[in-house]
């Protein structure tokens, strides 16, 4: 339960910070360097949130060979690098993950 609360609160903070500073209609003007840095905030935050989920379960190392989360994360990185489309990447990654769990007994 706590991880869901943490996940949603970090998502809200990231969204509102990015919206406030990157929305063209706001009166706040930041230097270009700061705007470029803000574009990397969400990916960096998602990596820091998802790493413990992918590699650990109940504070114990999951391993890699039989870890469906690891294979799903690697697939998501490749699909995102190839397509560069957010919705397509999410849909294909979720489909891959659930097919792997339900049909390949991970």
Image (cartoon, rainbow, N blue to C red):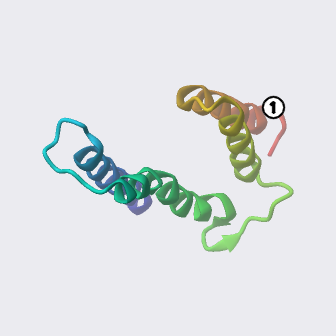
Q: Position of residue 52 (x, y in %)?
A: 59, 65
Which residue is depicted at the point 82% across and 41% down? 105
Q: Quadrant of the N terminus?
A: bottom left
* Number of numbered discs visible in the structure rendering: 1
Q: Nearer the viewer, residue 52 or 42?
A: 42
Position of 54 relative to 79 (above/below): below
The residue tagged with tag 1: helix, strand or loop? helix
Few, some or many residues within 10 Å of mark 1 (<14, 14–19, 20+):
few
Q: Is residue 5 visible?
A: no
Q: Position of residue 10 (x, y in %)?
A: 36, 57
Q: Residue furthest bottom?
A: 59
Determine whether, in the image, residue 29 is placed left or right of residue 80. Answer: left
- According to the picture, the residue beneath numbered tag 1 turns out to be 103
Position of 86 relative to 66 (above/below): above
Determine whether, in the image, residue 54 is placed left or right of residue 41. Answer: right
Q: Nearer the viewer, residue 40 or 67?
A: 40
Q: Position of residue 78 (x, y in %)?
A: 74, 40
Which residue is depicted at the point 30% across and 44% down? 22
- The answer to which image quadrant residue 65 occupies is bottom right
Q: Position of residue 72 (x, y in %)?
A: 71, 44
- The answer to which image quadrant residue 54 occupies is bottom right
- The answer to which image quadrant residue 2 occupies is bottom left
Q: Nearer the viewer, residue 6 or 84?
A: 84
Which residue is depicted at the point 83% across and 54% down? 66
Determine whether, in the image, residue 28 is placed left or right of residue 98. Answer: left
């Amino acid at each position: 339960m706590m991880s869901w609360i943490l996940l949603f609160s970090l998502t809200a903070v990231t969204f509102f910070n990015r919206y406030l500073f990157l929305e063209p209609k706001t009166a706040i003007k930041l230097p270009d360097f700061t705007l470029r840095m803000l574009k990397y905030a969400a990916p960096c935050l998602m990596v820091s949130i998802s790493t413990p989920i992918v590699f650990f379960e109940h504070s114990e190392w999951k391993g890699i060979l039989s870890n469906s989360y690891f294979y799903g994360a690697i697939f998501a990185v490749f699909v995102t690098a190839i397509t560069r489309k957010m919705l397509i990447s999410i849909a294909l990654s979720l489909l891959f993950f659930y097919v792997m769990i339900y049909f390949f007994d991970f």
